Amino acid sequence: MELTGKRLLVTGGAGTIGSHLTERLLEDNEVLVADDLSNGRREWVPHRATFVECDLTNPEEVESVLTEEIDAVIHLAAAKLVDTDAPRRQFEDNTQMTYNLLERAREVGVDEFVFTSSSTVYGEAPSPTPEDYAPLEPISIYGAAKLADEHLLSVYAHSHGMTIWNFRFANIVGSRLRGAVVPDFIEKLRSDPEQLAILGDGHQEKSYMHIDECIDAMKHVIENTSEPMNTYNIGTRTTTSVTRIADIVSEEMGLDPDYEYTGGKRGWTGDIPRMRLSIEKLSALGFTPELSSDDAVRKAARELIEEI
């Protein structure tokens, strides 16, 4: 699908990734953003985008934003907490939003649909994890909901003639990021520059990718693939430990705090201590990120220190 001259519906377009993606898409397209502002912020939505505050769990509200005039849907909206205190609500809301959008797209003849999934669908899999790894055994409700969403996408791809782009993200970092390790460390160090509490044992090690390269990768895949179901990992070949993130953030803030660890190999229930996605499929398509995981964290830290 050429991302030029299209009228696109971006759900979750007021969030971190969604707002950055919307900015890029507006260079060559019209964009309608639908967001309930539970995670995002209205001021993050670019001025040239049309914005509708919308509850996508409500089929009637989905009907109001997804019309015959839309050329493609890019669905990022989700309840994102991995360690949620309302797991049933999260599972039902996330899967209901995806079902409502897919069914409405089928009704109005919108055949192109982009979905942002997550590395959490793999569970505690060997690294690097390729797209065809099995069995997929998520260990969080968030991961289970993303996997259920992927199964819905497969039905609409293979039984209803839709073209689906399904992206399994590593940890995406950059400006506007909230509720994640880099901004959390910045906020903690602003409150207490002498000491930093770190969840787990600090050895958790994952792949981090900067938002700019994430969007570059998404656009590259969308514009160069056309199978009914196009599933791609989006990440880096390198990883960064939680303690290393603390070091990077501290260095960028000019601080030298003492670290205090809460203990255990997981930072929270459902946390996957080690994650690195295989990006060989993405690389074979002609895209390889330039920034290492450490470099992505450092760039994001600099952006967030200026912003928060």
Image: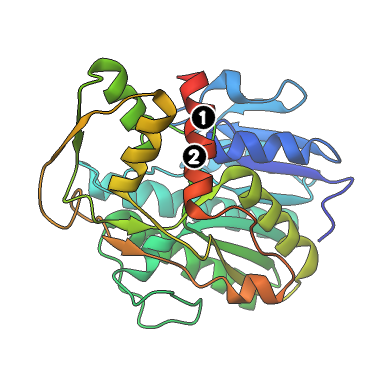
Instruction: Give, as a three-letter code, the residue at label 2.
Output: Arg
Residue matched to label 2: 298
How would you rate the neighbour count of disc 2 (Cα within 10 Å): few for under 14, some for 14-19, many for 20 or more?
many
Quadrant into which the N terminus falls: bottom right
Tell me: 12 left or right of 221: left
Q: Residue at x 67, y 56 (%)?
A: 218
How would you rate the neighbour count of disc 1 (Cα within 10 Å): few for under 14, some for 14-19, many for 20 or more?
some
Q: Is residue 12 above or below residue 127?
A: above
Residue 160, by quadrant, is bottom right
Q: Residue at x 30, y 48 (%)?
A: 242
Q: Residue at x 56, y 46 (%)?
A: 210
**Does residue 257 appear in this view?**
yes
Q: Position of residue 52 (x, y in %)?
A: 62, 27
Front one among 41 and 63: 41
Q: Position of residue 62 (x, y in %)?
A: 58, 41
Residue matched to label 1: 302
Q: Residue at x 64, y 36 (%)?
A: 20
Element on which disc 1 rests = helix
Quadrant into which the C terminus falls: top left
Residue 65, by quadrant, is top right
